[in-house]
Amino acid sequence: MDWRCPVMIENWNPLIFVISLAVIALISWIIRRAGEDKKKKTSAFFAANPVPPGNKIKDIYWGFYIALGKVYEVLKDLHSGLLNDYIYWFVLLIVIISVVILL
């Protein structure tokens, strides 16, 4: 039985790959440049309705803070701002995922 991929390209040219990448980047830049130059300053809106003046809502995520308040507080307590802690959590998560996959 032949296990080769039917769409596999056996002989590829890196020069063609780099040229294709450059052409795609150029087309993306041209499309990006065709947009508006000036940014319009708009106010935040909630559920497609403009925020009424005098509203005391501080940001657009207030609903998440209220609905997920307990989870937010736990995550806020875990956040120390130290890079070592993030690396510790990352390594711990990788170990847990590896154990689950291997068992």
Image (cartoon, grey):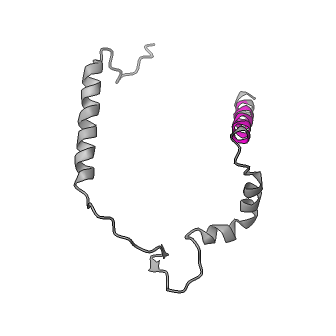
* Viewer-side residue, 73 vs 97: 73
Q: Is residue 81 magenta?
A: no
* Viewer-side residue, 2 vs 39: 39
Q: Position of residue 44 (x, y in %)?
A: 47, 73
In screen coordinates, is 17 left or right of 65?
Answer: left
Indicate whether 79 appears above or below 26.
below
- Image quarter for residue 99? top right
- Image quarter for residue 62? bottom right
* Viewer-side residue, 30 vs 82: 82
Residue drawn at 72 percent across, 51 percent down: 79
Q: So how many labels did they put on this image?
A: 0
Q: Position of residue 20 (x, y in %)?
A: 25, 30
Residue drawn at 69 percent across, 41 percent down: 86
Indicate whether 18 appears above or below 62.
above
Q: Position of residue 72 (x, y in %)?
A: 71, 61
- Image quarter for residue 24? top left
Indicate whether 100 appears above or below 35.
above
Quarter of the C terminus within the rendering: top right
- Is the magenta region chiefly helix, strand or loop? helix
Q: Position of residue 65 (x, y in %)?
A: 66, 68
Quarter of the N terminus within the rendering: top left
Q: Is residue 94 magenta?
A: yes
Residue drawn at 33 percent across, 65 percent down: 39
Magenta stretch in the rendered image: 85-98
In screen coordinates, is 45 left or right of 28?
Answer: right
Residue drawn at 74 percent across, 37 percent down: 88
